[in-house]
Image: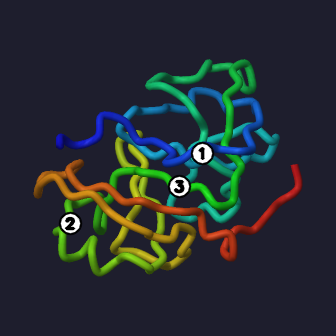
Amino acid sequence: MGRPLIAVPIGIPQCIKSMPIGASEVFKNRSGHLVKPDGSGRMEIAGAASVNIIGWMLQGERTASATEGADKGDVILDHDMVYLMPACGAAGIAVSEAVLKAAIGESCDIYVGSDYQYANVAASAVGILLIVGYEYYGSAVGDQWARVKINWEKVVNTGV
């Protein structure tokens, strides 16, 4: 079995809502699509310190319009969904299968580098993701994948 060509939700979502996308947000197929609202309620890719994640945006590979809110995307809002996304260690480095295996049941942070969103299994300062499984296809960056859930106990909701 080859490595995934796209990061995906695992299972059938029950709650999806169309939401506006922030200007020039970049979505890559082999990247996580966890999003959070900006100050105006438009969705943007969640970063390392994001604590107001609301879900996973269903988007193909593209860059959103340069106009704030001109594009919309469907966001999975289910609290029990599992997502498959690339995994990394500190600063986006590859991790071993042993590290991934040891991370199951632990929380981790998000890392974003070069427009790719990863589950950073080496960091848990925020602990916004819970690691529930992994897929390992080799030692190169991008060959390690994590099955994650949003850690709703760490999410801080803000008014929009």
Q: Is residue 36 above or below residue 75?
A: below
- 10 Å crowding of disc 3: few (<14), some (14-19), many (20+): some
Tell me, yes or no, whether the two marked residues, 1 and 3, touch with CB atoms within 8 Å.
Answer: no
Q: Secondary structure at mark 3?
A: loop
Tell me, yes or no, whether the two marked residues, 2 and 1, touch with CB atoms within 8 Å.
Answer: no
Label disc, if present, on residue 117 of the rendered structure: none
Q: Label 3, on which residue? A: 47
Relative depth, front residue between 41 and 8: 8
Gap in angstroms between the C-alphas marked 1 and 3: 13 Å
Total number of numbered discs in the rendering: 3
Q: Is residue 115 above or below residue 102?
A: above
Q: What colour scheme was applied to this rendering of the protein? A: rainbow
Query: Comparing marks 2 and 3, which lies closer to the viewer?
Result: 2
Mark 2 is on which residue type? Answer: Val
Instruction: Report the residue at 39% width, 43% height from top.
Output: 116
Q: Secondary structure at mark 1?
A: strand
Q: Label 1, on which residue? A: 56
Tell me, yes or no, whether the two marked residues, 2 and 3, touch with CB atoms within 8 Å.
Answer: no
Gap in angstroms between the C-alphas marked 2 and 1: 24 Å
Find residue 105 and report its image quarter: bottom left
Q: Label 2, on which residue? A: 95
The quarter in which the N terminus is drawn is top left
Q: Earlier in the sequence, mark 2 or mark 1?
A: 1
Relative depth, front residue between 148 and 114: 148
Instruction: Report the residue at 18% width, 69% height from top.
Output: 97
Instruction: Report the residue at 30% width, 34% height from top.
Output: 5
Relative depth, front residue between 126 and 97: 97
Q: Is residue 47 above or below residue 4?
A: below
